[in-house]
């Protein structure tokens, strides 16, 4: 019986690995080109993410590889420091991740505000869509994110008015995007297991081949390993330069946050073993360190490939490992087939990916936690698009910290006096913590000794032990002087129980919708 179960699991993992391989192949190449590197640099990262990280992973059903979320940052680093320094940056980013996993910091990355994480992903989506739209027209991106966005209408008009190869490439890209949309929406369920991005690229390839189109095609070497750039001692010593060090820290932080967010989403998709976050972080560190030694793209856990893995019926880490093997076999034996892929078709895949990332579907879930979360989300997105990824994430984190400090220090005390009945109503709104204890104490001490005081806590979000002690001790003193104090302690306790449950449900729904 055990043998049958093992054989069945093996077969399901094998089938799932083929599906993931078909999803990963166009994405690995497209992300590499968008990052300013040869397409095989993305395939090598996918191979390492499958075989090495798949074997070590703390999230067995998560699939790792080059991620759209790092495209913008990697392109900036390649443009600023050259492709030869990218390996050094990725190597040290991997070592930082490995150290974070060893020192059990995996759970801390999960503490980053969802508003910042989703703002980062949406901002990245906008940047990818804006830059790859120009690539889809066989043109180079103009510059910054806002410049690329502003330049889209002009690029479209130029391509249409001239009717040259840029217009032709754009038609292939549009055909690719339309195929992806159509396949996802209208393909029969029996064949929907074939990934939409792969179908889109195949349609673009066939159209270009049949019509003999004069557009740009993927350029790959016969030997995929020829793109590797090994770090030299001189380059390694440059890690102490501030710009290089900040680049390594940025990749380590963003890759870790995206990986663990993805792992949390994957856990919600299946009923198997839960993620071991520190082990996953260490595995990612090992994978990125190897990618750094080879001078190729960094990796993260990626939701598109991971969800395809779960939906295809994977039951263990074998599927992720096998998908890496398929990438290795294909790129080693059949690299010449990639030369028939139009660059505009791969750009079309990334335009679609950018659209999916940029669509603000998380906003309704964030609204359940207040307008402050939506403001942090919007500011993070705007800063990323207007400046760069690092500034946007840092500003989002700073705003989250200020919001937290405000939430735990903001207390409004509204006093309503009824002299005829010798009654005082105190309405507390916000958070009653030790930070606001002097204000609360001053208000209580200023009341008449013999007054009947009713403290309303319906609009109170939180109260700590220090303020509870204050109310308790003041209650005794006030009664001794002939007064009385009324608080709905039982209702308050029940309300907090209900609110905790509601908050948990909202957080769970936000994580599910945001995945």
Image: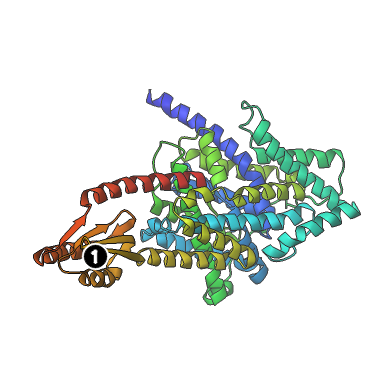
In the picture, measured across the screen, residue 400 lies left or right of residue 418, that is right
Query: In the picture, residue 433 is in which quadrant?
Result: bottom left
Residue drawn at the location 76% of the way across and 61% of the way down: 151
Write down the residue under mark 1: 419
Task: Rate crowding at label 1 as few (under 14), some (14 to 19) or many (20 or more) other CA atoms within 10 Å.
Answer: few
Extreme residue toward the left, this view: 480
Q: Nearer the viewer, residue 323 or 472?
A: 472
- Asked if residue 90 shows in the view, the reply is yes
Vertical position of residue 27 compared to residue 126: above or below: above
Under circle 1, the secondary element is loop
Q: Position of residue 270 (x, y in %)?
A: 44, 37
- Quadrant, the N terminus: top left
Colour theme: rainbow
Extreme residue toward the front, this view: 420
In the picture, measured across the screen, residue 92 lies left or right of residue 442, that is right
Extreme residue toward the top, this view: 1
Residue drawn at the location 55% of the way across and 77% of the way down: 241
- Asked if residue 256 shows in the view, the reply is no
Residue drawn at the location 26% of the way across and 51% of the way down: 492
Q: Nearer the viewer, residue 252 or 317?
A: 252
In the picture, measured across the screen, residue 77 lies left or right of residue 216, that is left
Vertical position of residue 441 compared to residue 114: above or below: below
Query: In the picture, residue 293 is in which quadrant?
Result: bottom right
Residue drawn at the location 46% of the way across and 47% of the way down: 510
Vertical position of residue 190 compared to residue 153: above or below: above
Q: Exactly how many numbered labels are in the figure?
A: 1
Q: Position of residue 314 (x, y in %)?
A: 49, 35
Q: Position of residue 208 (x, y in %)?
A: 82, 42
Q: Position of residue 334 (x, y in %)?
A: 70, 42
Vertical position of residue 502 compared to residue 77: above or below: above
In the picture, measured across the screen, residue 194 lies left or right of residue 455, that is right
């Amino acid at each position: 019986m055990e043998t049958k179960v093992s054989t069945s699991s093996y077969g399901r993992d094998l089938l799932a690995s083929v599906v993931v391989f078909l999803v990963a192949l166009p994405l690995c190449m497209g992300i590499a080109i968008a990052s300013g590197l040869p397409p095989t640099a993305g395939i090598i990262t996918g191979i390492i993410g499958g075989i090495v990280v798949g074997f070590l992973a703390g999230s067995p059903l998560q699939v790792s590889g080059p991620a759209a979320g790092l495209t913008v940052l990697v392109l900036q680093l390649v443009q600023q420091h050259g492709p030869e320094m990218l390996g050094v940056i990725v190597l040290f980013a991997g070592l930082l991740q490995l150290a974070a996993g060893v020192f059990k910091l995996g759970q801390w990355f999960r503490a980053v505000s969802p508003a910042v994480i989703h703002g980062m992903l949406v901002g990245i989506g906008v940047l990818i869509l804006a830059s790859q739209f120009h690539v889809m027209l066989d043109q180079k991106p103009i510059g910054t994110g806002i410049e690329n966005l502003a330049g889209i209408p002009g690029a479209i008009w130029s391509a249409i008015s001239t009717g040259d190869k840029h217009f032709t490439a754009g038609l292939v890209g549009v055909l690719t995007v339309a195929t992806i949309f159509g396949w996802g929406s209208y393909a029969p369920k029996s064949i929907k297991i074939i990934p939409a991005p792969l179908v889109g690229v195949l349609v673009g390839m066939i159209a270009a081949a049949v019509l003999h189109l004069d557009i740009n095609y993927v350029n790959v070497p016969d030997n995929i390993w020829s793109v590797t750039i090994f770090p030299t001692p001189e380059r390694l010593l440059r890690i102490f330069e501030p710009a290089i060090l900040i680049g390594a820290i940025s990749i380590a932080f963003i890759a870790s946050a995206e990986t663990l967010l993805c792992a949390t989403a994957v856990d919600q998709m299946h009923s198997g073993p839960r993620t071991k976050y520190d082990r996953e972080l260490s595995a990612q560190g090992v994978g990125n360190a190897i990618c750094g030694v080879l001078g190729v793209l960094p990796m993260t856990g990626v939701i598109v490939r991971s969800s395809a893995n779960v939906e295809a019926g994977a039951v263990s880490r074998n599927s992720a490992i096998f998908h890496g093997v398929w990438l290795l076999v294909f790129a080693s034996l059949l690299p010449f087939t990639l030369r028939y892929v139009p660059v505009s078709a791969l750009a079309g895949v990334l335009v679609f990916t950018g659209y999916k990332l940029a669509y603000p579907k998380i906003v309704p879930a964030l609204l359940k936690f207040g307008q402050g979360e939506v403001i942090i989300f919007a500011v993070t997105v705007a800063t990323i698009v207007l400046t760069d990824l690092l500034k946007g994430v840092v500003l989002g984190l700073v705003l989250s910290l200020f919001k937290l400090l405000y939430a735990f220090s903001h207390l409004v005390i509204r006093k309503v006096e009824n002299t005829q009945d010798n009654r005082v109503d105190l309405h507390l709104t916000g958070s009653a913590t030790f930070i606001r204890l002097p204000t609360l104490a001053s208000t209580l001490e200023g009341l008449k000794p013999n007054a009947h005081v009713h403290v309303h806590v319906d609009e109170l979000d939180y109260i700590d032990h220090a303020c509870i002690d204050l109310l308790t001790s003041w209650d005794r003193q006030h009664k001794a002087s002939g007064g009385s104090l009324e608080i709905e302690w039982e209702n308050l306790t029940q309300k907090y129980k209900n609110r905790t449950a509601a908050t948990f449900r909202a957080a769970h729904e936000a994580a599910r919708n945001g995945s």
